[in-house]
Structure formats: C-alpha cells, structure tokens
Image: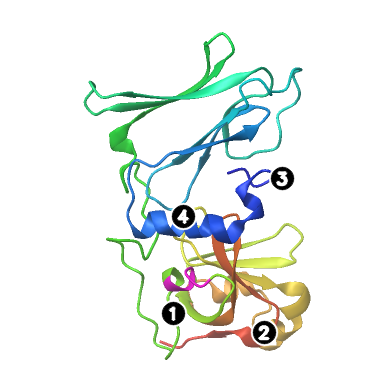
Amino acid sequence: MADDRAAEAWVNYPRERDRLYRLLRETAAAGVVVLSGGRPLAELSQADAGLGYPLFDLTAGGLNMANRRWRPAETNPRRVATMPAGDNFGVVAIDWDRTPPRVSLQARDAEGDVAIQQKLDLSLLQPGAAGQPVAAGSEGTPAGPKPTTPGAVTPAEAAKYVNEKVTLEMVVKNTGKARDGGLVFLNSADFRGPDNFTVVLDMRKAGDGLKAAGAADPAAYYRGKTVRVTGPVTVYRDKPQIIVEDAGQIAVVEK
C-alpha cells in the first residue's frame, strides 16, 4: 500500500488499486485485511480506503531472502511497524473462542518470535465500526445533494469516473493552499475524510482568469459556495480530484 516506492507496490497501478477499493466500498465488504509479500522486509501498514474501518496491509519477506543487514526503513507514511532486516514469515492467527473473535496479524523472525503484531477484534472490521464514515455513495450512505445543473454529478458519483471528463457540482466545505501558493484546494468534505473530493486550482495557469472573475483569493471566495467544475477525474493518494488549469472550468452555482 505504500505510496512512495518506485517498484513492487500498487502505487504503480493506481487505477487497479482504485478499482479494488471501490469494489470493497460498493459491496460494503467487512473483515478485509490485505496480505502482501515479495519484499526483503516485513512491515505492517494502515490505509484509509473509505471502508468505514482501517485497512491493514501485512507484508512478509521471502522466507530466506530478507535483508541480511539492518538498513534504514524505507519511506512509508502508512507504516505502523517494520522489520527492516532478518528472515521472516507472516502469520494470521484467529481466535474464534473469543467474543468477538480476534484477528492477530503477525510477522515472525527465523526463530518464530513475534517481531510485529496487530490485534484486531473482528467487530472492528465492519463499515462504520471504527467511527469512520463509509465513503459517500457506498451502500447505506447518501451520495450528497442532487445537482441542479443538468448532466452534473455529485462528488461520490464523480469518483467513479477516473480518467473520464465529468461536470461536477459540489458545496465547498473547506479550503486549503500549498505552501508556495501555487495550488489552492477546494474540498467537498473534511480533507482527511474518505468521502472527500478535491478541486485543485492550478494558480500558475488559471490564476489570472480567476482574478478576472473576482476570485483573487480563491480559498476565501469559493468557501461555502456551490461550484460547478468540468474536467477529467484523476486520483492522488487514493483520493479523487479534478485539476483546474483554466478559469473557465469552474463557476459558482447560484442557489
């Protein structure tokens, strides 16, 4: 699940990974954990895939092909724990005698000792059980206000059309800026939330046009307003977005 590796990770196949996450959301799949391998290390990662509960990824190295020497851990902001050196193998232990049953995700060293362990009650791995909302548009979750613009879609609907051009209508709940001011972010929900859709304003390309339209400070101008945005849907760190490079792509919808 790591986003920062140049090889041997699904970050190289974002559309396929998004398709898997979308399938899990749309089917309200429960009890899901990810098991991965083929790496010279052991690691446990955690991602927010919009399931309404944390998605854990247990990675085990080849049984006798791990790093022989200790080395600094690779960049992985999703890391929970790592074993960067030494032969290892993975174990998924399930205690069915407990109520609720407990799942233990383990990485063990060559002597069989537990080097990494995450214990999870099976009841946690249910949509909404961790206090996280299920991504908008998923089973049992409203997709958002119906657009007033003919042909426009909601943020939840737009997220299904990766690499396709859509017209999106959404309320800008909060905004943000890149440190250098080159990008402005308009969010449909909390920017950390699984149901957020982001409209990214590229100020280097669209800044003059936005200023001419009265949006000299886009973060303040669009906050709280309903906007209509047209452009291709892309994905950045598992989150859907539309990048605005021309001021003509975005307009305020009068209510």
Whether pointer 2 and pointer 3 mark residues with C-beta atoms closer than 8 Å, the reply is no
Q: Is residue 81 visible?
A: yes
User: Separation of disc 1 and disc 4 at Cα?
Assistant: 20 Å
Bounds of the magenta segment: 157-161
Residue named by callout 2? 247
Name the magenta segment's main secondary structure.
Answer: loop
User: Separation of disc 2 and disc 4 at Cα?
Assistant: 32 Å
Q: Secondary structure at mark 1?
A: loop
Whether pointer 4 and pointer 3 mark residues with C-beta atoms closer than 8 Å, the reply is no
- Nearer the N terminus, badge 1 or badge 4? 4
Q: Residue at x 34, y 50 (%)?
A: 29
- Nearer the N terminus, badge 1 or badge 2? 1
Residue named by callout 1? 153
Placement of the N terminus among the 4 image quadrants: top right
92 part of magenta stretch:
no
Residue named by callout 4? 21
User: Separation of disc 1 and disc 2 at Cα?
Assistant: 20 Å
Looking at the image, is 62 positioned above or below residue 168?
Answer: above
Q: Secondary structure at mark 2?
A: helix
